[in-house]
């Protein structure tokens, strides 16, 4: 049998096959990195090739060797992670899209770091933990439900496109949660707190959404 669907209108089986092949191809585009932009771009967004820098204006200078991140709250293993400890955790590489609430999206970013799932295996949140609160060296904070932090494509990133994450983009270590607007992806990570109650962060206090799903346009409220 040929794997090319026939357009012959007299052959209903072939038509059904053609439709099925098209449906499969389209559903692949929902998640594949080579999908057509219209299927990858959340509502109200446009794509950019350059990667903009957005933050509160201060770019903390934290050399890798001096970087330390504390982990506290409802976890079995609270404590401090330094650069060597962080690099000793399992390392992952992911490709994902950025969606910023200011309406730009950037496709196909190659990240390396520690997946949040491996991080969670290591810190062991207690069953009561429901939210993760991130605090950064510039005073920024953001909050998200534990299940969103634990998304399969989320990571504590130290590299972008094969290079150490630059200072302006949050190096040495930032969070990347691709399925939420980018304000949840805290740069210059300093502190990770596990709680049973939500604690609104810098933008959430100022009216941004507590979750921020770009596909639902959860920008405000
Ligand atoms: N520490 C820190 N993280 C932050 C911010 C910030 O001001 N400080 N801004 C957030 C916002 S609003 C956006 S859009 C992204 C921008 O990341 P970028 O500058 O790498 O594009 O970082 C997020 N993480
Ligand atoms: Mo943003």
Image: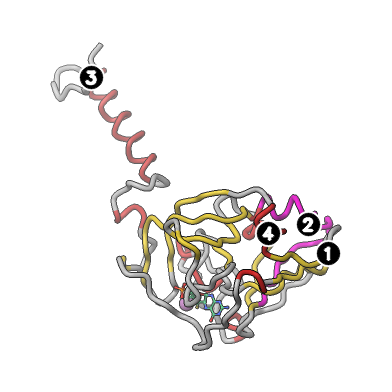
Q: Which residue is mark 1?
A: 78
Label 4 or label 1, whichever lies nearer to me, is: 4
Q: Secondary structure at mark 4?
A: helix
Q: Residues within 10 Å of mark 1 (few under 14, many from 20)?
A: some
What span is colored magenta in the figure? 117-135
Q: Which mark is residue 12?
A: 3
Q: Residues within 10 Å of mark 2 (few under 14, many from 20)?
A: some
Quarter of image, res 135: bottom right
Query: Is the C-beta separation of discs 4 and 1 under 8 Å?
Result: no
Q: Secondary structure at mark 3?
A: helix
Q: Residues within 10 Å of mark 4 (few under 14, many from 20)?
A: many
Label 2 or label 4, whichever lies nearer to me, is: 4
Q: Which mark is residue 86?
A: 4
Q: Is residue 102 magenta?
A: no
Query: Is the C-beta separation of discs 3 and 1 under 8 Å?
Result: no
Q: CA distance from mark 3 to mark 4?
A: 58 Å
Sequence-wise first label, 3 or 1: 3
The spot of residue 140 in percent (x, y) is 61, 82
Sequence-wise first label, 1 or 2: 1
Q: Which residue is mark 2?
A: 123
Query: Is the C-beta separation of discs 2 and 4 under 8 Å?
Result: no
Query: Image check: 183 left or right of 19?
Result: right
Sequence-wise first label, 3 or 4: 3
Sequence-wise first label, 4 or 1: 1
Q: CA distance from mark 4 to mark 1?
A: 14 Å
Label 3 or label 2, whichever lies nearer to me, is: 2
């Amino acid at each position: 049998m040929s794997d090319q669907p026939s357009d012959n209108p007299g052959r209903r089986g072939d038509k059904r096959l053609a439709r099925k092949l098209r449906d499969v191809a389209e559903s692949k585009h929902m998640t594949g990195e080579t999908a057509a932009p219209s299927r990858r771009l959340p509502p109200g967004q446009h794509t950019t090739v350059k990667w903009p820098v957005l933050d509160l204006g201060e770019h903390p200078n934290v050399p890798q060797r001096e970087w330390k991140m504390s982990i506290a709250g409802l976890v079995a293993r609270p404590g401090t992670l330094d650069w060597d400890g962080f690099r000793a955790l399992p390392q992952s590489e992911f490709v994902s899209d950025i969606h910023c609430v200011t309406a730009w999206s950037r496709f196909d970013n190659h990240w390396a770091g520690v997946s949040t799932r491996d991080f969670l295996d290591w810190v062991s949140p207690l069953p009561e933990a429901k939210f993760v609160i991130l605090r950064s060296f510039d005073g920024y904070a953001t909050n998200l439900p534990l299940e969103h932090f634990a998304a399969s494509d989320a990571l504590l990133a130290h590299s972008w496109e094969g290079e150490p994450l630059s200072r302006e983009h949050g190096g040495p270590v930032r969070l990347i949660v691709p399925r939420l607007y980018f304000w949840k992806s805290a740069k210059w990570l300093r502190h990770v707190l596990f709680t049973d109650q939500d604690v609104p962060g810098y933008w959430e206090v100022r009216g941004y959404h507590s979750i921020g799903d770009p596909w639902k346009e959860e920008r405000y409220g």
